[in-house]
Amino acid sequence: MDTETIPTPDDGVAMESKEDTEAFTMVKSKKTQKRKREQDGADMDTEAPVASKRPQFPPISSDKLKGADEMRKVAVPAHRYTPLKENWMKIFTPIVENLQLQVRFNLKTRHVEIKTCKDTKDIGSLTKASDFVRAFILGFNVEDSLALLRLDELFLESFDVTDVKPLKGDHLSRAIGRIAGKGGKTKFTIENVTKTRIVLAETKVHILGSFQNIKMARTAICNLILGSPPSKVYGNIRVVASRTAERF
């Protein structure tokens, strides 16, 4: 009898694997591609940088550095016309002579206009002059407003009584009365203890002083608006003022 050769399972697997290898091509792995890219990038970085020439600009003259003339306008309400007219020379002299600025009162627009000129040395003097005029328009004396020109650490802050607490009618008038006190006693006491200047204009409160002093005065005024008795407010102010004096 002729013996037939029966293929074993191992032979079939070997034949299939040979056919698969012939049918499919080898694919390069992504890792090798990444490595090649990194090597190429490293080679590019190692190249000598191209020397670039620095641009050379001519120096700017002082006239061009200042730029065009700047102007500030401060609106003047009707009730401040007479005080402005009476104290015009006191306002005009320091702005023109000390700050080297130009100033005028425009009758048509009813604004105090302050402008720089060729003689102006410091551009920041324009801001000082506008703050000085604005402080006078808000109701401060000329002598107190002049401190804004001489000192750099003085500021103006304004707020409304109704911003602290929405009051109307008699309640609003009583709150303003508590801030002022009898004959202005409370207002003067807050000014002397906190070393500030305060102006009450209807429902508006304007405070002139340094940042820390304005904070103390504002806290005291807000407590009065909220209904605290003046004696308690005096005590709190004295405690805070003594603490700040010890620090310095």
Image: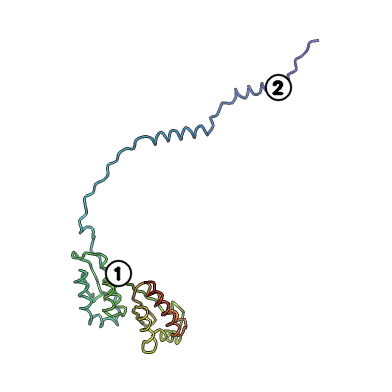
Position in image of residue 58 (x %, y %): 21, 50
Q: Nearer the viewer, residue 213 or 176?
A: 213
10 Å neighbourhood of mark 2: few (<14), some, or many (≥20)?
A: few
Residue denoted by label 2: 10
| Separation of residues labelled 2 and 1 (CA atoms) | 98 Å
Q: From the image, which quarter does the N terminus lie in?
A: top right
Residue 152's disc number: 1
The nearer-to-camera label among 2 and 1 is 1
Q: Nearer the viewer, residue 31 or 152?
A: 152
**Local secondary structure at mark 2:** helix
Quadrant the C terminus occupies: bottom left
Q: Secondary structure at mark 1?
A: loop
Identify the amino acid type marked 2.
Answer: Asp
Looking at the rendering, which quadrant does residue 123 occupy? Answer: bottom left
Q: In this view, which residue lies farthest toward the front?
A: 246
Q: Position of residue 61 (x, y in %)?
A: 20, 56
The image quadrant of residue 141 is bottom left
Q: How would you rate the neighbour count of disc 1 (Cα within 10 Å): few for under 14, some for 14-19, many for 20 or more?
A: few
